[in-house]
Image (tube, helix red, strand yellow):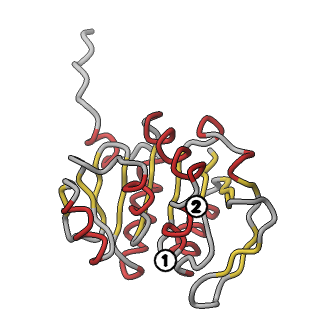
Amino acid sequence: MKIACVLGQGFEDSEFRVPYDRLKEEGYQVDIIGVKAGEELKGKKGKETVKAEKGIDQVKPDDYDALLIPGGQSPDHLRVDKRMVEFVKAFDKSGKLIAAVCHGPQLLIAAHLVKGRTLTAWQTIQDDLQQIGANVKDEPVVRDRNWITSRKPDDLKQFSDAIVDALEGGDEARAQRPSEPAAHP
């Protein structure tokens, strides 16, 4: 399975590193997608510096099984780029997993996807979400159909666990699907 990680300048270091490392440990391919391939991206705390492996013009949602949106200042920088917003919108339309943490839901807001959805985010983003009609829960991890959202660095282990569980079709993922009638012998 391949996971797209959209990343811009000023990302929250741990919100990239913790789920990225966990997904890699589980054997998933994670591509760092920036505005431009080869661009050096620096975390806001200066602990992480990574290169965009692919530019947004080189990828399409069909290439990936899930989308990871770390927080920090990155989502605010990415949401001004129409190509990033369209990528997120198309990803959601496909029904594939979207995992966003902290300020990550700013990209979901820019794509006009949050009204009527249930999610969480960083405290200040929670207010923005409520004002535009989202159902907000102040919980470490919130699942709503193909979305997994989380609030902050303290929640990253639970967030990463929920992503892996969903990708592996775990109990939580099965609980989100409509039940199937029992087979008759």
Tell me which residue sits at (78%, 59%) in the image.
37
| Viewer-proximal residue among 29 and 134 | 134
Tell me which amino acid carries mark 1.
Gly
Mark 1 or mark 2, which has the lower sequence index? 2
Q: Tell me if residue 102 comes above or below residue 48 in the rendering.
A: above
Tell me which residue sits at (61%, 35%) in the image.
62
The label on residue 161 is none
x, y percent for residue 139? 23, 70
The answer to whether residue 5 is left or right of residue 34 is: left
Residue holding disc 2: 23
Q: Quadrant of residue 182?
A: top left
**Residue extending farthest top:** 185
Query: Label 1's element?
Result: loop
The label on residue 72 is 1
The answer to whether residue 55 is left or right of residue 109 is: right
x, y percent for residue 88? 50, 48
